[in-house]
Amino acid sequence: MGRKRKNPIYSYYIYNNETNKSKCQMEGCQKAIRGHHAGNLVRHFFTQHRAEYNKMQERTLSDKDVNSLTEYNKVLECCINLVAIHGRPLSLLEDEAFQSLISMIPNPGLTPNIRNIRTCIENKAYDVRKKIYEELKNKLVCLKIDVASVKSRRFLGINLQFILDKKLQLRNLCVVELHERNTAAFLKDTVLMVLSRYGIEPRQLYSITSDNGANMLAMSRQIEEEIQDCLEDFSNTEEQVEESDIIFSPADSQEMLDLVESLEFERENIAQPIVTAVRCAAHTLQLAVRDACKELEPVFELCRRAVRTLRTPNVALELKRNQLLQAILDCPTRWDSTADMLDRLVNLKDFCKEHYSDLIGDETWSKIEESLQALKPCRVLSKRLQEEQLTFGDFYIYWIKCITELEQMNTPIAIYLVICMKAREGNLLTNDTFLSAVYMDPRVNSILSEEQNERARIHLMHTHQRYINLQLQTQDRPTNENDLNQDNVPHTSRSNIDSFFERRYRERQRERPTEACNQLKHSLIDFLNSPLLPTHENILKYWYEKRFTDPQLYSLSTIALATPPTQVSVERLFSSLKFILNNLRMSLKDSIIDDILLVRNNSIYEKSD
């Protein structure tokens, strides 16, 4: 007879002598583990049933052991941050020096290693997704999407933006690896798959900000078509339901009729585009400057030849002896790097004239200085567009300021830049989402024409109706099993009275949409008569202070002003990807990359909040 087993872990398993396997008894888990060794059982319990494992430890450990467990959990948290936040490879956890360091810490459980730290990262990523799911429930959301290649692997990055209180909140949804061509259909399926992981339905999408790529714009259109098909399928399914298939009491018939009519009202009011594709403002600026710089390409090419000469080993050494900075060679597709190249050349002008006067002539130097002066406001604008708390109103203020400064220069290059920027601005002014965001910003809404104001009002009214329908459908949906089994409740006189008032309430709610729609229209028209705000005012704070006095417009502003003008945060996301996916971590699978970046980026966003 063996010794008595005292470890509480055995109570969670059933051991089969014939098969020599221990079967886990946790609900939903039928894992069979070979043998009956406590260490293997604890390892499975720790990695797969963490919450129950912690409860078991709290019940069985002494106060001293509980403190040791708390310290151990802190060690695990530090190991997670080491890998996910600070970009260290998982192989570090197996290094002898690291294991020796860990052995000095009281350890009542498992020793950190690659397998359990990877599991901890997966669990933490799950917690992050669950938190995002709770934040976005019943909300219209705005997406930022971009695709990039890193180490010959292509990734799709998706960020989400919304307003909470008086600040723009940013959340990273995924960095998923793409294994097919970047067609619009494939990108659409991938985006919808990612959204489904967070419980976000397609009808909750308000806008998608991306670059001006044809596949990205086509993807947004296909997502809208997908939503329309879902609504049509719902309508067809509803028509196929026969009256004989539905059993309800006479008291419930009026409620059912009210529900059907409310759904009919919803379908009739979906006339405008559901999802609006928004062109990235930073990319729009990039294209405008590139258009203007085409005339200067001969000058830039001459500068590149001069820079290549200045970057040769002998000349670079001579620059270092003279305590001068090295020349910069630009990336031709990035105008800001071209501006950096010109700026550095101007700083080296005296050195070039003294030692290499044949590289650049005096006339070319004048064009370089003139070009650099004209590009200066655009460089300032480019930096401004990287702000996190950036609304479309802020963007337009910075945009107009840049154009004004260029017009004051009155040089040929500056004037051509203004022409190109105004041409690109036309694409923005035809976007209903942009017009709606500007309409809701009393700092800049005076620039809209009457036709643009009308388009913005119609779009805002449809957006508000979508928001209301989203809330009503959520209220009509059963929340628990008790709601589904109301037949078990005896019908008393009190319940009949409640049903009467319930029906009257639904009738009033059904009559309110038209009344509310007219009221909203008048509120939007009256809003244009509000005094203009100074451009330095915080528009999010302005609306936050109106959340009680004007709740209808406030709820509308939290949707319209949340539209991201740029996708800059997604490009920063790819910078994080380069940091994580370095030469020492090339074998990382796409799933663990997604989890690591989800933990890393959302922790950064929360700190910035």
Image: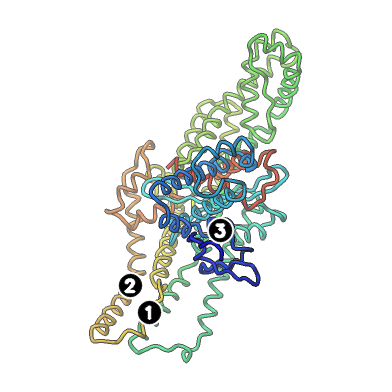
Relative placement, left or right, of 147 versus 267 is right
Residue 131, given in percent of the width and then of the height, sits at 46, 55
Residue 518, given in percent of the width and then of the height, sits at 34, 64
Q: Which residue is mark 2?
A: 509
Q: Amino acid at mark 2?
A: Gln
Relative placement, left or right, of 367 versus 384 is right
Q: Work out whether 395 lies above or below 557.
A: above
> Does the residue at mark 2 contact the one at mark 1 (Cβ under 8 Å)?
yes
> Does the residue at mark 3 contact the one at mark 1 (Cβ under 8 Å)?
no
Q: Residue at x 49, y 48 (%)?
A: 108
Q: Residues within 10 Å of mark 1 (few under 14, many from 20)?
A: some
> Which mark is drawn over residue 386?
none
Residue 275, given in percent of the width and then of the height, sits at 53, 59
Q: Amino acid at mark 3?
A: Ala
Going from the N terminus, do you reach mark 3 or mark 1 first? 3
> Which mark is drawn over residue 38?
3
Question: Disc 3 versus disc 2: distance between alpha carbons?
Answer: 61 Å
Relative placement, left or right, of 535 versus 311 is left
Q: Nearer the viewer, mark 3 or mark 2?
A: 3
